Image: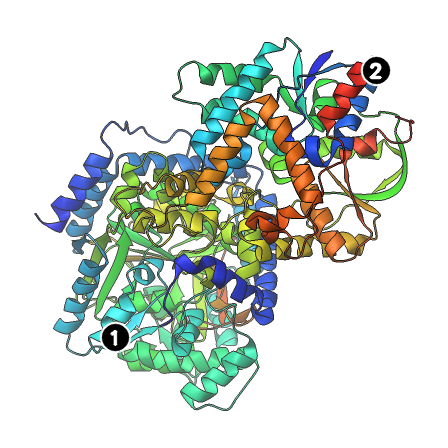
């Protein structure tokens, strides 16, 4: 008998007489309920991202985003910058001066890059989390290998809860589904040596989110 | 209210003053107390060590004895014995009508402090004791019976008595029944952590409602040369009235 | 690698009690995790409902495990994942070895996984000449030192900065340092090299999702992201109990698990991996294999009461809450799974032949049950396993306990006989009191054990029942 048949047979025998019933209650239990408005979501996202030690820069449009991006990159003294293949990333990095852009497929280049720039497909206000799907860009290593990850986020992509994010993602292995969906809350961290928190152990030491929110302009004085 | 006292082995043999104090406190609270001297052990040590058959035999005996009395409540000056009796319907599951009989007994069985506060609604027994004390939450009382506020309220109403919370008051004292003899060094190490926290509060006594914990804590305090007393809550509640 | 001896729990525990460095580290770690957990839970008013939901989802998954596994296999296969099944540790190790062999002498990067520890995958691969590299910082430190993890989420808490500095100086040839940032940077550099050249990545999984054929991995460091993104081939070893029905169920576990483990609202990273790369334009492994591991789990499933232990999500909260674990750490248990849950899981998976001491490694204080995010009734399961030991039964299809406990059995039978009759009982207590006064109790091993560091409370001169009788005679 194959291991598969054997194991499934043993499981079925073990469950003889057991009635399977659906779990009562809702998967939404303990989900925050006060994040209905756009402003509340942005606000919660901002607070939780800060708690997770991520930086946030709010800009009103792509032009401002390009300017701030240039500042962030130069402050980090990043000369080699890994970029995902998203059109927005290409657009915003076009104007960067004095830097070398590294293609997401160039592994050696990625390993040597000082910053990585990707888009964010969704974000979660509940936890200050960025959600990266692979169906729309090559973002896995760009967001992971360089010591600084700059993430471009449209305010409309901020969802209220983890449940909303799980409903929005499209994980799978066929067609246009995402082979990998990555949830990111702050920089890479460890406390494995004497419980002392150290950031940047395997992944980025710094996470900067460029939040593109046109409503900031409307609200501006 | 008429209550039947289930005194527990440890109180009976090692802490009889706590038994007498329990009777005094119950009477002060307006209860008529009966005690059936045929009672022995509820079986808890056997149950917790895995000797379920021995435990069930003693549990049945105890249930049969307690159901003979028509007292409205069974009061036990021990959280762990109370927890065993409350668990009896499950422990005696699959033994015919025993589970139901045990449930009837379990339904009117209470630990002393829980009985006073939750059933009788009594929080001030007019006791007086000039001491600074710390409350030790016995595991079974706290986690199986939900006794947290009840004993504290009773102690706060003892005049002259100051209740000082020790950090880690909800931690196990290291007794654990037969655990204390199977792993003595481990058991003592657990006590030490607790005792150091109690000592740091500068109290004169640690109070609990489980004779097992009191035996463990006092045994270790004595070995460490500490003057901190271990008192049963009944002793505190009965004090200062010449009882 | 250190050999594991659960049968020597008592000895191991005494040794651990003598290790002040270890105990200091344990106090710090378990205290910190415990406090952080408390704070994280306190801000969740619906914590109880969340636990109930998680418990219910796990119960549903386990009660329909065959259906869930088949669904997972079907969806995962459709996603391009190769799904394999392994009855036991040997089969699972052989499968991984065969994959490694097919790749020649690949650089192997591993992420922390309890299942791979359970089947001793590293030993197996090393015997075949492979060099799997652990990439979680704590696990890597332990691997370099040739030790085993002492805590489920902080494997190297028993090592000081100085010890890690000395270890790195010796193994990596770097200048000695006691700065955790510098040590972490050194680890990053060394492990980056392994990742850059890795052809085979080996991980576990926190959850397998039947609905989508995906696995979910939870971490803080990013090494799991690297191990699942960089190597050409990815192997995930997944216990069959890890499967949950729906993707939306994840939100429940994501709210519970990090808070329970480290007190974080969410860990830095969760990776939901659903298949190998889409084509040459995509990232990720070219090949992805999921090995579904039984290794005793189906036997635990067959046991109506032990079944709930399969709901464990490996958060480590019960370890941090356990007053026994906090004194001695994980090594004393002589098992990959330590603490209260380990003392249930290990006998469940292996039987009681070597693990009979573990169910007794607890004072049954119940602190574990209070913090368990899926509400496993650990004291009840420990008590149940104690009964198995006493009665010479084997849980599931594991092995029976070896030693019959004749003396203890006789003692409890005697106790029962005494307690079954009030006259016998009263008399025996008087005899015991006299014997104690004559110092004869020193002959009894339990009394001797008790006196180790404690004064034994003497029998009172008059018992309560004697007082009561006298009061009765005097007419109160």
Any part of residue B145 in sight: no
Protein image colouring = rainbow
Toward the viewer: A93 or B96? B96
Any part of residue B105 in sight: yes
Toward the viewer: C175 or A127? C175
Secondary structure beneath label 2: loop
Q: Which mark is residue C474?
A: 2
For the view shown, which residue lies furthest in the left direction? A1
Q: Residue at x 69, y 30 (%)?
A: B12
Picture quarter with the C terminus of chain C: top right
Q: Chain of mark 2?
A: C
Q: How many numbered discs, if any?
A: 2
Left or right side of C3 for C293: left
Q: CA distance from mark 1 to mark 2?
A: 81 Å
Q: What residue does disc 1 label?
A: C126
Residue B148's spot in the image, x, y percent? 69, 35
Q: Residue at x 60, y 27 (%)?
A: C425
């Amino acid at each position: 008998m194959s291991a598969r048949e054997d194991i499934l047979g043993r499981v079925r025998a073990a469950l003889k007489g057991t009635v399977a019933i659906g779990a009562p209650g809702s998967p939404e239990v303990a989900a925050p309920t006060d994040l209905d408005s756009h402003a509340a979501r942005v606000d919660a996202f901002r607070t939780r991202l800060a708690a997770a030690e991520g930086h946030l820069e709010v800009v009103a449009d792509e032009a401002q985003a390009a300017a701030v991006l240039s500042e962030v990159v130069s402050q980090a003294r990043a000369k080699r910058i890994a970029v995902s293949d998203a059109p927005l990333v290409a657009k915003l990095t076009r104007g960067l001066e004095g830097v070398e852009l590294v293609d997401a497929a160039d592994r050696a280049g990625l390993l040597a890059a000082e910053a990585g720039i990707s888009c964010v497909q969704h974000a979660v206000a509940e936890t200050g989390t960025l959600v990266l799907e692979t169906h729309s860009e090559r973002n896995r290593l760009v967001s992971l290998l360089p010591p600084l990850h700059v993430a471009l986020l449209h305010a409309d992509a901020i969802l209220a809860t983890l449940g909303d994010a799980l409903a929005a993602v499209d994980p799978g292995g066929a067609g246009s589904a995402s082979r990998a969906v990555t949830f990111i809350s702050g920089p890479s961290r460890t406390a494995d040596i004497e419980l002392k928190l150290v950031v940047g152990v395997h992944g980025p030491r710094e996470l900067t989110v460029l939040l593109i929110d046109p409503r900031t302009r409307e609200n501006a004085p | 209210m008429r209550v039947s006292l289930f005194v527990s082995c440890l109180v009976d043999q090692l802490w009889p003053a706590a038994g007498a104090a329990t009777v005094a406190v119950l009477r002060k609270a307006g209860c008529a107390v009966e005690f059936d001297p045929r009672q022995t052990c509820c079986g808890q040590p056997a149950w917790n060590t895995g000797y379920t058959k021995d435990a069930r035999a003693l549990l049945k005996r105890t249930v049969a004895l307690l159901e003979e009395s028509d007292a409205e409540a069974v009061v036990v000056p021990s959280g762990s014995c109370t927890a065993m009796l409350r668990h009896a319907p499950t422990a005696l599951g699959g033994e015919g009508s025993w589970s139901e009989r045990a449930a009837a007994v379990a339904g009117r069985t209470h630990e002393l402090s829980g009985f006073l506060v939750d059933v009788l609604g009594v929080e001030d027994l007019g006791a007086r004791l000039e001491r600074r004390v710390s409350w030790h939450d016995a595991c079974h009382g706290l986690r199986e019976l939900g006794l947290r506020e009840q004993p504290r309220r009773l102690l706060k109403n003892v005049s002259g008595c100051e209740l000082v919370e020790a950090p880690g008051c909800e931690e196990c004292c290291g007794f654990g029944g037969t655990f204390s003899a199977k792993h003595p060094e481990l058991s003592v190490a657990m006590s030490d952590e607790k005792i150091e926290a109690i000592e740091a509060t500068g109290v004169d006594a640690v109070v609990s409602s489980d004779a097992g914990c009191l035996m463990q804590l006092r045994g270790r305090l004595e070995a460490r040369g500490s003057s901190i007393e271990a008192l049963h809550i009944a002793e505190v509640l009965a004090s200062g009235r010449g009882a | 690698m250190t050999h594991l001896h659960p049968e020597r729990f008592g000895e191991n525990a005494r040794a651990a009690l003598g290790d002040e460095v270890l105990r200091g580290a344990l106090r710090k770690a378990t205290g910190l995790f415990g406090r952080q957990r408390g704070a994280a839970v306190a801000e969740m008013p619906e914590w109880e409902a969340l636990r109930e939901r998680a418990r219910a989802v796990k119960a549903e998954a386990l009660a329909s495990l065959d259906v869930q596994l088949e669904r997972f296999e079907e969806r995962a296969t459709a996603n391009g994942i190769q799904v394999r099944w392994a009855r036991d540790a040997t089969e699972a190790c052989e499968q991984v070895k065969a994959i490694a062999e097919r790749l020649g002498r690949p650089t192997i990067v591993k992420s922390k996984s309890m299942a791979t520890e359970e089947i001793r995958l590293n030993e197996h691969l090393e015997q075949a000449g492979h060099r799997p590299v652990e990439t979680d910082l704590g696990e890597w430190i332990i691997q370099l030192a040739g030790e085993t993890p002492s805590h489920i989420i902080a494997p190297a808490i028993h090592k000081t900065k100085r010890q890690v500095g000395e270890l790195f100086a010796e193994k990596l040839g770097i200048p000695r340092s006691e700065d955790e940032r510098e040590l972490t940077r050194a680890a990053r550099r060394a492990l980056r090299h392994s990742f850059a050249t890795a052809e085979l990545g080996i991980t576990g999984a926190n959850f397998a999702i039947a609905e989508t054929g995906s696995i979910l991995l939870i971490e803080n460091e990013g090494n799991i992201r690297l191990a699942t993104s960089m190597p050409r081939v990815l192997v995930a070893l997944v216990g069959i109990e890890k499967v949950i029905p729906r993707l939306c169920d994840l939100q429940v576990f994501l709210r519970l698990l990090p808070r329970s483990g480290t007190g974080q609202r969410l860990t830095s990273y969760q990776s939901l991996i659903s298949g190998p790369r889409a084509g040459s334009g995509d990232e990720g492994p070219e090949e992805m294999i999921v090995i579904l591991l039984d290794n005793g789990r189906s036997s635990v499933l067959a046991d109506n009461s032990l079944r709930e232990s399969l709901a464990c999500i490996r958060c480590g909260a019960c370890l941090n809450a356990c007053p026994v674990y906090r004194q001695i750490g994980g090594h004393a248990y002589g098992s990959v799974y330590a603490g209260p849950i380990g003392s249930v899981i290990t006998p469940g998976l292996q039987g009681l032949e070597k693990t009979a001491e573990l169910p007794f490694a607890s004072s049954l204080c119940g602190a574990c049950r209070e913090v368990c995010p899926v509400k496993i009734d650990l004291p009840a399961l420990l008590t149940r396993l104690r009964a198995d030991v006493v009665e010479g039964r084997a849980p599931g299809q594991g092995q029976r306990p070896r030693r019959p406990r004749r003396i203890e059995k006789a003692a409890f039978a005697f106790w029962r006989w005494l307690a079954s009759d009030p006259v016998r009982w009263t008399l025996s207590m008087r005899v015991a009191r006299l014997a104690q006064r004559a110092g004869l109790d020193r002959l009894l091993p339990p009394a001797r054990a008790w006196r180790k560091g404690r004064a034994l409370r003497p029998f009172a001169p008059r018992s309560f029942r004697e007082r009561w009788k006298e009061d009765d005679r005097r007419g109160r």
